[in-house]
Amino acid sequence: MQIRIIKILKEWEISKSLIFNADDYGRSPEISEGIRAAHKYGVVTSTTCMMNIATTADDISLALKESPMLGLGVHLVLTMGQPLSAHGAVKSLTDQQGSFFKYGQVLKSLPNLNSEEVRTEWQAQIDAFIKAAGKKPDHLDSHHHASYFSPALFRVMLELAKEYDCPIRFPFTARAPGEWGKMQRYVPDLLNEFKPRRPDHFIAEFYDQQATSDVLIKLINELGEGVSELMCHPGFVPDAFVNESTYNTLRQRELGILIDPAIRNAIEEREIELINFARLQPPDRRIENTGHRFLN
């Protein structure tokens, strides 16, 4: 009993915790390899898996073998590739070829999306992760933040998070402009209804031309109290991927920054604890030793 009390008090002493969550695990084997490198040699503590890509299950096996402390969640997909569900089961989500609508078309089609079809597909993606990993995801988020496009989509994700008993990404910030600001209007009621576990803060600024060492150190210096999630997109990028995605070579630049010892030093100097989403589990279901350990 005394040991448990000391452990709890020890956790309370740490006022700032940070999840470096790498999006798009499974997007390609090379991107997955880069994410594992950003964990093994850098500061990435978590990633989320795109289960509608054929090679992702193999990438999960590699992560479990090579990087057992890397947190693994599910990156719910609605805007890229093909669904896991049979085409006839999710007609409102797909084009005539059976592929998901692209980002812009999804936004235009929101009134026509069938929530039950979304649930069917996202549940299939979560179940595919469980089959590949042998365990439930440690959190849910979504590609292009699609699960926050409407109250109906947000509700589906919250229902699944409750069903699978896992935390969520919460990408709303006080600085959310434009459409994100409008989307926040429905958020409080749904949060009160479901009370999902989530980080206290979300950091999206380390992206595109803002993905620099100076920006990242500034974000670390300004980190708020509590648990923060910093979204990142590291990876190795094959030549073929450059023509496939608009966010391509910058992934390798992110990787270089995330394994830079200067970033590690900035985090250690400020006594910030690196964790993954498993730390947001209730105390009796936490995975032990989730605090990140830097490699020498």
Image (cartoon, helix red, strand yellow):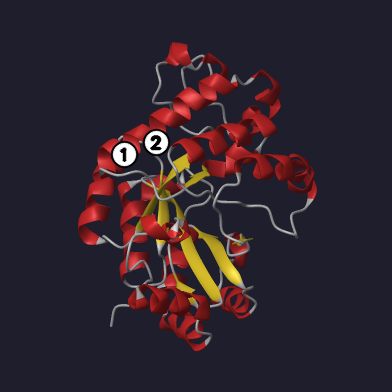
Looking at the image, residue 257 lies above or below residue 131: below
Q: Residue furthest left?
A: 65
Dot 1: element: helix
Rounded to the nearest angstrom, the CA distance separating label 2 from label 1 is 6 Å
Residue 126, numbered label: 2
Looking at the image, residue 127 lies above or below residue 94: below
Displayed quadrant of residue 296: bottom left
Dot 2: element: helix
Q: Is the N terminus in the top left, top right, bottom left or bottom right quadrant?
A: bottom left
Q: Residue furthest bottom?
A: 269
| Three-letter code for the amino acid on which mark 1 is drawn | Ile
Between 250 and 40, the residue placed more toward the observer is 40
Q: Is residue 280 visible?
A: yes
Residue 296, numbered label: none
Bin the neighbour count of mark 2 within 10 Å (Cα to Cα): few under 14, some 14-19, many 20 and up. Answer: many
Counting every numbered tag in the picture gives: 2
Q: Position of residue 142 (x, y in %)?
A: 52, 42
Displayed quadrant of residue 227: bottom right
| Three-letter code for the amino acid on which mark 2 is drawn | Ile
Q: Position of residue 257 (x, y in %)?
A: 46, 73
Looking at the image, residue 133 lies above or below residue 152: below
Asked if residue 41 lies left or right of residue 65, the reply is right
Residue at image point 79% right, 48% down: 178
Q: Position of residue 150 (x, y in %)?
A: 68, 33
Q: Are marks 2 and 1 in contact (CB under 8 Å)?
A: yes
Residue at image point 63% right, 63% down: 205
User: Which residue is label 1 attached to?
Assistant: 130
Residue at image point 44% right, 79% down: 10
